[in-house]
Image (cartoon, rainbow, N blue to C red):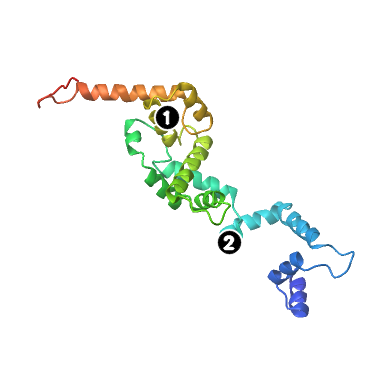
């Protein structure tokens, strides 16, 4: 390996960077030599077809500049798991306090700070195809939150169901029909109708308990319309 590198430097003043650039860009000098397209295919096969080479590239992917466009799927999963375990917004729904703790702005901040690669990937994929289109930035970012919620919920339904459970309770409380809720649950937007019903029943029982143990020493005013 050392002799090959020395030969390129001594005879062509090339390093690996210059060699690879020429390999995938310069047109073949003779008719029967490999075309640029063939060389690019061979390079892809050499990198992605050899586990040792691919592993070495993946282990050092963080040192690559953002402009490369390379995304590590394992890193995306790690960020999703980090959101699930360290963010209330993407964690598990427990009770009424979870519902009260729902904060979409905080969910967006957590996504940006705890899963930067995932957010950048979603943001890039959702970029408008027209350069002259001005998008609603808030709407765009909150859609990223919902997409992230679907991914995390699909990956870990029992421990990353805060947003889906809260959204389900909102739909149920707004009078949305069971069939519509079941359809949205199938898309991963919310939990199942039965789960929503159990959560709503628990909230009702908790409210009843609070009412029973409340201090009614103050005046109680009932207004009838």
- Residue drawn 48% across and 25% down? 180
80 is higher (above) or lower (below) than 22: above
**Depth order, front residue of 56/183:** 183
Residue that badge 2 annotates: 67
User: Which of pointers 1 and 2 lies earlier in the amino acid sequence?
Assistant: 2
State the residue at coordinates (82%, 62%): 35
Quarter location, residue 13: bottom right
Which residue is situated farthest in the front direction here? 132
Q: Position of residue 136 (x, y in %)?
A: 45, 49
Q: Which of 118 and 14 is in front in this view?
A: 118
Q: Which of 132 and 101 is in front in this view?
A: 132
Relative placement, left or right, of 110 versus 48 is: left
Side of 84 relative to 61 (left or right): left
x, y (%) of residue 6?
74, 75
Snapshot quadrant of residue 204: top left
**Residue 219 image point, x, y percent:** 10, 25
Task: Check the image and report above or below for 23 versus 14.
Answer: above
User: Which quadrant holds the N terminus?
Assistant: bottom right
Report the label total.
Answer: 2
Q: Mark 1 points at which residue?
A: 168
Q: Is mark 2 on a helix, strand or loop?
A: helix
Q: Real-space Cα distance between discs 1 and 2?
A: 39 Å
94 and 121: which is toward the camera: 121
Would you place residue 20 above or below residue 46 in this image? below
Badge 1 density bin: few <14, some 14–19, many ≥20, Cα 10 Å: many
């Amino acid at each position: 390996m050392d002799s090959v590198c020395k030969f390129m430097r001594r005879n062509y003043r090339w390093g690996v960077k210059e060699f690879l650039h020429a390999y995938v860009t310069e047109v073949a000098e003779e008719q029967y030599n490999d075309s640029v397209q063939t060389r690019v295919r061979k390079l892809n096969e050499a990198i992605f077809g050899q586990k040792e080479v691919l592993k070495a590239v993946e282990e050092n992917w963080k040192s690559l500049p953002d402009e490369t466009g390379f995304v590590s799927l394992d890193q995306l999963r790690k960020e999703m798991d980090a959101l699930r375990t360290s963010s209330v917004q993407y964690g598990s729904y427990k009770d009424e306090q979870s519902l009260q703790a729902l904060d979409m702005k905080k969910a967006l901040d957590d996504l940006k700070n705890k899963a930067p690669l995932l957010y950048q990937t979603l943001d890039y994929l959702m970029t408008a195809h027209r350069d002259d289109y001005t998008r609603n930035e808030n709407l765009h970012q909150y859609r990223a939150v919902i997409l992230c919620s679907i991914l995390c919920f699909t990956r870990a339904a029992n421990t990353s169901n805060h947003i889906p459970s809260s959204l389900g309770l909102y739909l149920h409380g707004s009078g949305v029909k069971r069939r519509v809720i079941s359809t949205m649950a199938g898309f991963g937007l919310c939990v199942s109708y039965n789960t929503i019903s159990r959560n709503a029943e628990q909230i009702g029982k908790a409210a009843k308990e609070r009412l029973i143990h409340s201090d009614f020493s103050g005046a109680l005013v009932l207004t009838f319309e």
